[in-house]
Image (cartoon, coloured by chain):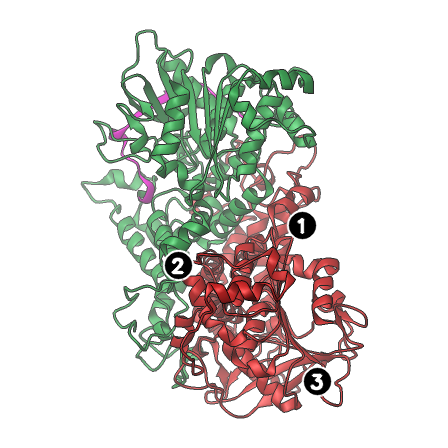
Chain colours: A red, B green
Amino acid sequence: MSLNTLSRTLSRSRLRPSFRTLSLRFSSSSSIQSSPSSCPAPSSQNDARQGQPHFPCVDAHAARASRIMASLSQFRPTPDNTQADTGPEPPYARPNPASYHIYHHPQPLPLSYSPTPLPSFDIAYETWGTLSPAKDNVILLHTGLSASSHAASTDLNPAPGWWEKFIGPGKALDTNQFFVICTNVLGGCYGSTGPSSIEAETGEPWATRFPVLSIFDMVRAQFLLLDHLGVNKLYASVGSSMGAMQSLAAGWLFPERVGKIVSISGTARSTPSSIAMRFAQRSVLMADPNWNNGFYYDGLPPHTGMKLARQIATITYRSGPEWDQRFGRQLRQVPETPTQELGPNRTPALCPDFLIETYLDHQGEQFCLKYDANSLIYISKAMDLFDMTYPSLKALNIKPLPSPTIPSQDQLQQQQHKTSHSKSHPPPVNPPPHLSDLAAGMAPLVDIPTLVLGVQSDILFTVEQQREVADALRMAGNANVSYYELGGVWGHDTFLIDTLNVGGAIRGFLS
Amino acid sequence: MSLNTLSRTLSRSRLRPSFRTLSLRFSSSSSIQSSPSSCPAPSSQNDARQGQPHFPCVDAHAARASRIMASLSQFRPTPDNTQADTGPEPPYARPNPASYHIYHHPQPLPLSYSPTPLPSFDIAYETWGTLSPAKDNVILLHTGLSASSHAASTDLNPAPGWWEKFIGPGKALDTNQFFVICTNVLGGCYGSTGPSSIEAETGEPWATRFPVLSIFDMVRAQFLLLDHLGVNKLYASVGSSMGAMQSLAAGWLFPERVGKIVSISGTARSTPSSIAMRFAQRSVLMADPNWNNGFYYDGLPPHTGMKLARQIATITYRSGPEWDQRFGRQLRQVPETPTQELGPNRTPALCPDFLIETYLDHQGEQFCLKYDANSLIYISKAMDLFDMTYPSLKALNIKPLPSPTIPSQDQLQQQQHKTSHSKSHPPPVNPPPHLSDLAAGMAPLVDIPTLVLGVQSDILFTVEQQREVADALRMAGNANVSYYELGGVWGHDTFLIDTLNVGGAIRGFLS
């Protein structure tokens, strides 16, 4: 970044309100703050200086902005560092290219929603285990929204991955048997092409000129990587959350190349409730002035919007019962500022005061500089758009679709006798229209054994959606659907935590 | 507002990023936007001007700011209008004092969390029906978070109220029989004293120098109004949502002055989940630079933060099943801009595109200028703080508490035979500790017949919390607890909608 650019960034003045907020704590010269009061004010906000309220949780946004600006200024060009001027990649989400592999696909990728293909793309990936000579032991692992390809530690990157406990010798994805591949998703910011990548035509980041993606686009990019690796057929396609969408989409796009499907806490059709929660996140992010219509890569990223979005997301990832047990109504015992009173005279604060609030605040703070805001927007939108009903898939026009065929109730009942799993969860006798549409849409998956696993305390991908996936597959005629519902209090995040039950179901299904 | 003040407000520059956002749509001279691209961009964002993305849903914030500033500028002083300079009340939430009554209490009000009392206060109220000569037919109706005293139409204000269908001759609150009083809550912005009110000592709005309130403080202010009206004992205390908290708190503070209690979709102890949802709303509000630590009354209010907060709140007010039925996965059919393509070539937009998104956007837009941001923060905090467990009430030190006494299981079983209602929902045999604490805390309500009504699809005040209220009251020894659970798809908002079942239960209980 040049000095000029930095200066322009500063002059764009998105920092100014923050600096002003900071200054309020040390000055009462502002016209609207000039009347100090001796009246009681909310305790932790009640600064010793003249009873003037201040809010550490709000000041934190300005402090973060200052830290980011300081780190950006390190990229000012020097005689030894002229390259810094060309460095458009945001430092807050800069991946380490030495820690994973990159496949560069030089040809255009056709897209679901765009008449113009993506000119070329990169896919970052990591692997575990050994590829068999016949290349028939490959598991393609799909990630959730914001995860990188680093699902487990590797020689290149020994840090624990996001599914560390599930990948390795003797684990759910047994690397004594399988060769596991995990990619950063197309649209992401951890090495794969996304909105933060440079658009060759302009030499600038794509930003919001990047085309809207579908889950199917992401999967097609993955299969071009498989082509490159010479892998014709997957032993299994495995994923949780958004990864479960991809896992199902893989079977739909390439039924002859997918041996088994694992869909954990996913859906075949995003519901209004889950769209609403992701819309709320996108809204707070896009309302951050730093988002700047997506063009923030040479200045401050929308770090505050990202923090707020993550707080909302975290609410959907866990469950009320867990928080009852873990936090209850306990208050913070670590003061937010050195002067905060937590003793017997403690009075409530408007900033985070309950442990549940400090937990959400912390989750937001931890995340807000780790991920690219535009990637969050594009990928969450792709999740909203995911819909495997026949009419929706037909409108996509990404693959010729035969006329819908759904087995009769008689055929369904015969199929139920083929598998003991079905007996404990038979498909509904009078399915609603969208379920029939879903069965018709998912017909290409009829011959792929599929594990569907859901969690009863999941409020984002509800257990009703898990039943819907299993029902639709069975209505389509799939006689090899394994279906499990887990209890527990961990909600959507169960797939990251419950090695025993989630891992056990996967291991059993894959063996 | 003086010209100087207006000028200062503008120079504070919170508008500047918005103006800049607007200007992006008409200029490509910005350094970071100077490279028009022919590549595909998200459809509705893809402006005809050189493929430059823009976002109507984000521009809406700037447009709203301009509208507000224009209305603020109407208050510039003129020779005929010198009063305008002193007008500190925000026009976006200015109530109409002619449409309700105001009781001014000139003495100090002691507060739960503050060593210093509130010096004096106003309470706005409206009434329906006729006060009996013995003043023994009074129903005190408590509101939810953001409602005014206008629960139903009156001669002073013929507009429909927020509970219009429930108040009137022959309705749930039958004005042929009862004299109904509804107040704007202390801390609110519709006529009662709150953060937007003028602090006498400074002549300025309290803003965040206003003390943190409790639900009990609000109720004590209401009973000082009752004293003023000469009402010694209520026929019933009735409320839904936060109003249910107040309804229970009234019985707890003044057991001898409350004849019956109605608690609909409320709680006796806010849970981490509901705190989390309100925390998310406060966070987006307080992060809006216009919030300015609460001191925004002479400038732009945090309208964008309010809109975002209301979007989040709306998600908690309704339920997924209702949205499945009402919106499904339908897309908007009204273009967001004149150029938005909704025909066969439609591609997804990052701005609201699904009907569920336009619904939430609309709800936020409708609300954001109707309510005071600080009132939202203070009242939602009071809800979080509400906890009727014995230790929590004892710590409040607002009323002497006897030692806790809880009946034995034998006594409980005897009590269950006294009422048929209890048989369908007996108290738990092995209650968790917080339930015993709740029973001990709610002991003062032991002799007050209470109706507890909840909704199974409510995700904010879950049905488990309704059961908890009923269980605790019964464990405390209350033999007159009526308990109903409603089905349906309306979630928390059921109390505003379901006249038949909610209204019927109330009418039956009060008769």
Magenta segment includes B392: no
- Amino acid at pointer 1: Gly
In front: label 1 or label 3: 3
Q: Residue at x 28, y 55 (%)?
A: B67
Q: Residue at x 77, y 83 (%)?
A: A130
Q: Which residue is mark 2?
A: B328
Counting from the top left corner in percent of width and height, residue B109 is at: 48, 22
Q: Earlier in the sequence, mark 1 or mark 3?
A: 3
Q: Is residue B422 or residue B197 the one in the foreground?
A: B422
CA gap, disc 3 and disc 2 = 41 Å
Q: Is residue A381 or residue B232 the one in the foreground?
A: A381
Q: Which residues are magenta?
A: B92-112
- Amino acid at pointer 2: Gly
- Tally of numbered discs: 3
Corner quadrant of residue A404:
bottom left
| Rendered view: A130 above or below A39 | below
| Rendered view: B322 above or below A510 | above
CA gap, disc 2 and disc 1 = 29 Å
CA gap, disc 1 and disc 3 = 36 Å
Q: Which residue is mark 3?
A: A136
Does the image show residue A4?
no
Q: Is residue A342 or residue B309 the one in the foreground?
A: B309
Callouts 2 and 1 in the same chain = no
Classed neighbour count for the residue bearing mark 3: other residues with Cα under 10 Å, few (<14), some (14–19), many (≥20)? some
Q: Which residue is mark 1?
A: A488
Label 3: chain letter: A
